[in-house]
Image (cartoon, helix red, strand yellow):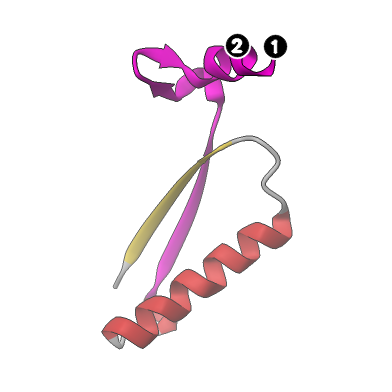
Amino acid sequence: MPYVKIQVTDEGVTDDQKRQLIAETTRLLEDVLGKDPRSTFVVIDEVSTDNWGLAGEQVTTIRARNKG
């Protein structure tokens, strides 16, 4: 029973993109590992850039600085 957790920042990932991630991840596990799609779980976790850090800073801060 595979469980895959995909974490992305909450910056406009569309429902169509999420559907594609779920379908393609499931297909990959079936193709590579022979896992049954009916027992494969894929969870997409959208994280606020305030809650995502890189190099000691919030991604929100980094993005704001790089826009300017």
Quadrant in the picture for the C terminus: top right
Q: Which residues are magenta?
A: 40-68
Image point (66%, 59%), residue name: 17
Q: Does residue 41 appear to the left or right of 8 in the view shown?
A: left
The label number, if any, that marks residue 65 in the structure image:
2
> In the image, is residue 56 part of the stretch drawn in magenta?
yes
Q: Quadrant of residue 41?
A: bottom left
Q: Amino acid at mark 1?
A: Gly
Q: Is residue 51 above or below residue 8?
A: above
Q: Amino acid at mark 2?
A: Arg
The label number, if any, that marks residue 68 in the structure image:
1
Q: Does residue 1 appear to the left or right of 58 in the view shown?
A: left
Image point (46%, 80%), residue name: 27
| 10 Å crowding of disc 1: few (<14), some (14-19), many (20+) | few
Residue 66 percent location from the top left of the image: 61, 17
Q: Does residue 64 appear to the left or right of 52 in the view shown?
A: right
Q: CA distance from mark 1 to mark 2?
A: 6 Å
Q: Is residue 25 above or below residue 35?
A: above
Q: Nearer the viewer, residue 55 or 25?
A: 55
Whether tag 1 and tag 2 are in contact, CB under 8 A, the answer is: yes
Element carrying mark 2:
helix
Q: Does residue 34 appear to the left or right of 48 in the view shown?
A: left
